[in-house]
Amino acid sequence: EAGVAQSPRYKIIEKRQSVAFWCNPISGHATLYWYQQILGQGPKLLIQFQNNGVVDDSQLPKDRFSAERLKGVDSTLKIQPAKLEDSAVYLCASSLLAGSSYNEQFFGPGTRLTVL
Amino acid sequence: DQQVKQNSPSLRVQEGRISILNCDYTNSMFDYFLWYKKYPAEGPTFLISISSIKDKNEDGRFTVFLNKSAKHLSLHIVPSQPGDSAVYFCAGNGIGNQFYFGTGTSLTVIP
């Protein structure tokens, strides 16, 4: 079974530039998550999708971050414009379903973003 | 607010000995707790979980203990192996299957 795919693996940009990350979840997984992991910290949830709808985006800095999952499969996360503090690893995860019970989340390898 | 805390950023253990990684939480509504393992340049991989209604779950060399009254859980690895060297994240599972992660503990197993 193929895992969660993410691209690119690494990205270096200058502040105020734009950047986009792509994620393809495990086939059949209805729920997709984007996390931000700053060095020395644990992953922090940015946004959660169920199929193509947003379940929770309360921690997404909406003035500069946006995400979409138009067909309920793959997803893109965009930052425009980037700030120095956005330097982090952006992790995508997916799970079968997010209901009232626990479902294991499977993580992709992440995209390491460096903002100069 | 940090709902899950791992107060030890690093741990060094001799091969063959026991590794004990600790985690504290504040949210009493978590219904599951999980441990994830992360190697450099890879995403976290699931290691073991425990339901909030249990106090122990064992899987091979890995055992997780939950003390709800103390809001504390721990991961025991026995015996520790060099391949266990990684960063270990504790997480609580909340409403909507949202995971709240701790800051991680870097385990080094010395051959």
Image (spheres, rainbow, N blue to C red):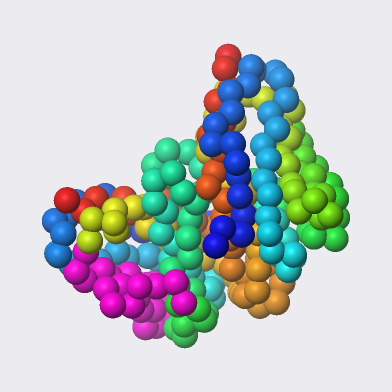
Which of the two residues, A7 or B40, is positioned nearer the viewer here? Answer: B40
Number of marks:
0
Q: Residue at x 58, y 23 (%)?
A: B12
Point out residue A78 in the picture as x, y percentages from the top left corner: 27, 70
Q: Is residue A110 above or below residue B85?
A: below
Q: Residue at x 46, y 49 (%)?
A: A41
**Does B54 sit left or right of B88 as displayed?**
right
Q: Residue furthest top?
A: B111
Check if residue A59 falls in the magenta segment: yes
**Does B46 sit left or right of B33 as displayed?**
left
Q: Is residue B22 above or below residue A12?
A: above
Check if residue B103 falls in the magenta segment: no
The magenta span reads A58-82
Q: Residue at x 71, y 20 (%)?
A: B17
Q: Using the rendered image of the protein, determine whether residue B59 is visible from the camera's viewpoint.
A: no
Point out residue B44 in the picture as x, y percentages from the top left corner: 51, 49
